[in-house]
Image (spheres, rainbow, N blue to C red):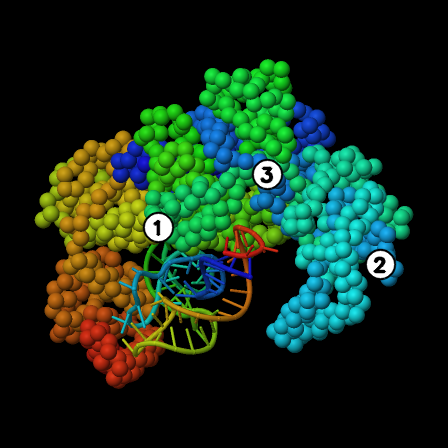
Amino acid sequence: YTIVIPPPNVTGALHLGHALNNSLQDILIRFKRMQGFNSLWMPGTDHAGIATQAVVERRLLTEEKQSRHDLGRDELVRRIWQWKDEYEARILGQLKRMGCSCDWQRTRFTLDPVCARAVRHTFFQLFKERLIYRGKRLVNWDTFLQTAVSDDEVYHEAVAGHFWHLKYPVIDPRPGEPTHVTIATTRPETMLGDTAVAVHRDPAAALDRAEAELKQKLAETPEKEREAVQAQLDALAQRRQTVLPMLVRLRDMARAGRMLKLPLVDRPIPLVADEWAKPELGSGCVKITPAHDPNDYDVGKRQKLPMVNILNADGTLNANAGAYEKLTIPKARERIVSDMEALGLLVEVEDREIDLAHSDRSKTPIEPYLADQWFVRMEQLAQSAMDAVTDGRVKIVPGRYAQGYLDWLGEKRDWPVSRQLWWGHRIPIWYCATASEADLHRAFADRDDVVWRRDEENDRWLICAREEDLADDAVRGHTLTRDDDVLDTWFSSALWPHSTLGWPEPTPELKYYYPTSVLVTSRDIITLWVARMVLTGLHNVGDVPFREVFIHPKILDGYGETMSKTKGNGVDPVDVMDKFGADALRFGLAHLTTETQDVRMPVEFECPHCNKLIEQTKKNRVLPRVKCAHCGLEFSTQWATKAEDRSLARGAVVSDRFELARNFCNKLWNAARFAMLNLEGYAAAAVRDDELAIEDRWVLSRLATVTEQATEALESYRFADAMRSLYEFAWDEFCSFYVEMVKGRLQDEARRGVAQRVLVHTLDALVRLLHPAMPFVTEEIWQRLAELAPERGLPQPARAEASVMVASWPRADKPRQDSQIEARFASFQEVLRGLREIRSRQNISPKTPIRFAARCDRATADLLRPMEPYFESLAGAHATSWGPEAAAPATNAHLSLKSVELFVDLAGLIDVAAERARLEKERGRIQGAIAAKQNKLANANFVERAPTDVVAKERAGLADLQGQLGSIDAALAALAKS
RNA sequence: GGGCGGCUAGCUCAGUUGGUUAGAGCGCCAUCCUCACACGGUGGAAGUCACAGGUUCGAGUCCUGUGCCGCCCACCA
């Protein structure tokens, strides 16, 4: 049984999302191990490697004021390793505290040589099959960190910004033609890369469409907001007069192939007609910078425009920027605006809120630029991964997530795999512009681990080497240069299930463990990782990487937001463990793992000084220190880094959602203590069925059922269901009833033996069942039990395993399931509850004994009569009579139950007012129920069409209720007399 | 814009194929420090199952639509 383990995020602390993931995996591993499977963890790919580099670079730039370019590749990588070692030690400590039996020794990182080899083999093979190719792509360039960031590391934020309205002169304007075209931009420096200005090909029609849309909107908007829409409509109408004629003219000029002069660099650029220009916005014209804007890139492709990149890889302007070369973007922006103004070409500066793409890493704006990148052709790879899911070789649980997976793959969008980083697997490609093909043949004649291909666009060879790096002079008389880029971390992560097992070598591990059993992960990673693992597995090994994928919920904070470092709303599992314990953390998380997609986790700070709770707000959750609203003292949080903050007492982040689990751990521990305190004279021996007391047979019956439920639930990843049945069995049945009922026998020397054996057996089974979810408490109980009762079990005792970790998972002992016993207990519990209720409502002290009569049919009487001693011990109630003729005492409290009417003798005890109030209320309730039933039965449709058993049930229910009503009336009458 | 999920007690959530009077934990009220457990026991109060239609003898549950919250993907799925 094999589980692929995704890693926790590298730069932050583990938060509850990671704790959930790791806990569920460890629950499965322990569960399967107990079932006798040979299990293997396959821990952590380092998909967060990029984050590490970014954090290190950010430190360098802010604290040491130097960039990676100053530092050099080797030194940067050395620092990253150092950072990662610190990080790993911390994460390992946390996982260990959580009880995760994760072994990270074997495969520390994806840069492990074994994995590195798998990466090169894969790249080589894809290159050879022409599934890897070189193409162009706009890259999100983080100018601060001087790296590209991937699409998912970009977030959009509205910021206060400017629209600069600029004028470009028309070359040789004819009479009547405009002399200038006005455009607006938020990034004036990109004008240096402009290769066209666009105007709509049919401005009148576009305006018509915009108008129609606005009218539609006007009709739909509520009265209040209409004014604003109407204003827009008016503006549009105005525009028809003022702007439209000019746009039509410009459009005609564009068709005629007229040119503009790009100021500052004096480059002629065409006026083009393209629908990207929006006549309803701004001047109606738009500058086109294909190398620095995604939309413009599309226009550039459509209009076959040149693409001028003005950026260097370090975020400064390059030679294409002419006089502005080497300036940083902000400096260039400043200069260009003032230069344009000097030329009289700056029309106005408009203040506006703009939606700007930011880098998640540095929090600075993104400057996209066009770059050559490596791509993986997805057509056939994606199809294979889709087939694996549609034909069921990979099962996704819950099934609804399969749709997203298929839809995403269905696009078959090529996968850009190159990244402009220094950390990661460097792309095994060398360039050579000077050699001839014959030279290459000569150099690599006897090698099948080198292939090459022509790069026509750049007039050079692309040489891919599989096994080892090529020397600069590998081709005699020519120089090879290696590609600087590294591969997307998902490229190596995608290989994880087979690369860690030794692929491409046919190792015994690969043979034994591949395909693995299950991947447990959260849904945001389905496309990034799951899909890619499937397709590389199929491509490389020829089989799927895992049989099942379990997608667990995401943990959100109290506001329903995803936990993340950026927001600072993550809950540190260490806080939870400190406050509630590791078992409570794990059980609690498993207990809320339902099939829904999210789980909310409202959290509070606990003041370490006065122990009061302080609401966690969006403001205070990111602070390193917080002032307690109750006692006024300050405490530190998980964000404290400075010594002065850290010296304060730490305020834990707590959530009452773990209280249930903590209390449960405590309950189990105390129940175990009780059992062990009562094992005096325990002797292991076989137990015959006829020796079993009623409660023994009942608890064994329930145990069989619960074992069955828990097993079934865990096998189908219904963690919450499993936890719920175990919780209820342990607390409501084992503790509240079995333990209470068995107390008497444990005091009785003659009956003690069997009671002890059944008690120990049940506890033993319960501890096994709970072990995966509560490893620490259960192990402790197990070890202590081993001292008192090393041999235990029903019907034949056997020596217990040395640790519950290697104990076997209980089998549901189905022959023990006894519906009759369970029915008897249901009645028993009902009567017991009734007796307690009467005691409570009559305010009778628990110490005062009471007597009661129970009116019921003979069968029920026979069933309950043997339980008499338990009514005495659990409710302090003595039964005086059972059966249809049971007489009500002169003064009594009455209660109608499903199968029994209870009369508690209240001679000398009665609180008449309380009893009357209670009876009146009861009467009202029953009358309501009777009316509902009578209505139902009066409905001819119901009687005719509903199944006969349902109708019969209704009738019986009605009769029963009417009987109860009679009794209540009688009781009320009796009260009136007294 | 598309897809997915949620809306059930003050809070956080269960509710299996439609079928008696819709459940749990926390919180609240009352009571009990009873010899495993006050992180406990016992009892209680508390819900127009988001809204509007529809199917059905019968709807929290099935269908259609609407609203709000959230997530994912994305200018054409």
In 3D space, how far apart are the residues under numbered discs 1 and 2 (Cα atoms)? Answer: 71 Å
Image spot of residue A106 (x, y percent): 42, 26
Which of B67/A711 is in front? B67
Kind of residue at badge 2: Pro
Instruction: Classify residue A943 by image quadrant.
Output: bottom left
Q: Is residue A342 left or right of residue A945?
A: right
Q: Nearer the viewer, residue A924 or A452?
A: A452
Give the chain letter at badge 1: A
Q: From the image, tell me which residue sits under label 2.
A: A178
Tell me the amino acid under the disc marked 3.
Gly
First in residue order: circle 1 vs circle 3: 3
Residue A801 appears in the figure:
yes
Neighbourhood count class around disc 3 (C-alpha, 10 Å): few under 14, some 14–19, many 20 upward: few
> What residue is drawn where x is 80% and y is 41%?
A332
Residue at mark 2 to residue at mark 3: CA–CA distance: 39 Å
Between residue A869 and residue A211, name the one nearer to us: A211
**Residue at 27% over, 53% down:** A733
Say whether mark 3 and mark 2 are on the same chain. Answer: yes
Distance (Cα) linking label 1 and label 3? 45 Å
The chain that hosts pointer 2 is A
Residue placed at 19% from the left, 45% from the top?
A758
Q: Position of residue A878 (x, y in %)?
A: 19, 63
Report the residue marked by disc 1.
Answer: A718
Q: Is residue B10 above or below residue A395?
A: below
